[in-house]
Amino acid sequence: MTLETLNFWKISTVKNLFILCTFLLLGCKSYKTTTELESTFSKQEIKDLQTIRTFFIKDILSLNDENFNTEFRHRIVNLEAEGFKSVKPKKIDKLFSSVSKSTFDEIWETKTQKRSRNSDDTYQYYAPKINGKYKEFLSLTTKHNSMVSKYYNNILRTEDFSHSSMLNYIADNTLDFDLNNTNVQIVMAIHYISICNENNITNQLIN
């Protein structure tokens, strides 16, 4: 093999490898972090939030990054109608165990609720931690999204996940969903994982 041929082979190989790597990087939907996330959470917490977001899209909605934006509204309406029965407790328990305790404690806190007005029996569920980093993250996100602003204000008022304001947002066909925004995806992920978890708890109490 001549020197010229060898050099050509090396250059050609490097070019092909570069093209392949570029294709793989562009072809893979990567998790886009944001200024709000980076200014609030640690690197490990941001990784945990990525896990939470992926669980919401893949395991709750049975979607992926490619069809999430176009299929979200249809899928979430169907899940609401069926009472989130397809989201089994074991799935959510597995998610919670995969998230570090420090991250979990910055998002959720345990609250106690009466089973009914006429009963002293209670059950526990997860509510947003009012003094946690997630509350700070919501506060920062409200500056760029009116939906999150209303949602955040209702959380502060009730100290609970405001499912009614989320439903109003989804039901409003005039709104343009900013579902490509990582912040919005995480807000919805944490909300619906929490709602599914509480729904599973109350169903177990009934059954």
Image (cartoon, rainbow, N blue to C red):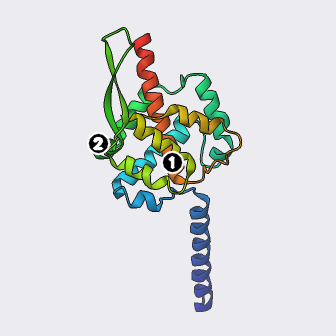
Q: Is residue 111 left or right of residue 163?
A: left
Front one among 105 and 25? 105
Secondary structure at badge 1 equals: helix
Q: Amino acid at mark 2?
A: Lys
Secondary structure at badge 2 equals: helix
Tell me which residue sits at (45%, 62%) in the image: 35
Q: Is residue 192 left or right of residue 62?
A: left
Neighbourhood count class around disc 2 (C-alpha, 10 Å): few under 14, some 14–19, many 20 upward:
few
| Badge 2 or badge 1: first in the primary sequence | 2
Q: Amino acid at mark 1?
A: Ser
Total of numbered circles in the picture? 2
Front one among 182 and 59? 182
Q: Which residue is mark 1?
A: 149
Q: Are marks 2 and 1 in contact (CB under 8 Å)?
A: no
Above or below, 47 against 38 in this view is above
Q: Position of residue 172 (x, y in %)?
A: 67, 38
Tell me which residue sits at (67%, 35%) in the image: 74
Above or below, 153 against 142 in this view is above
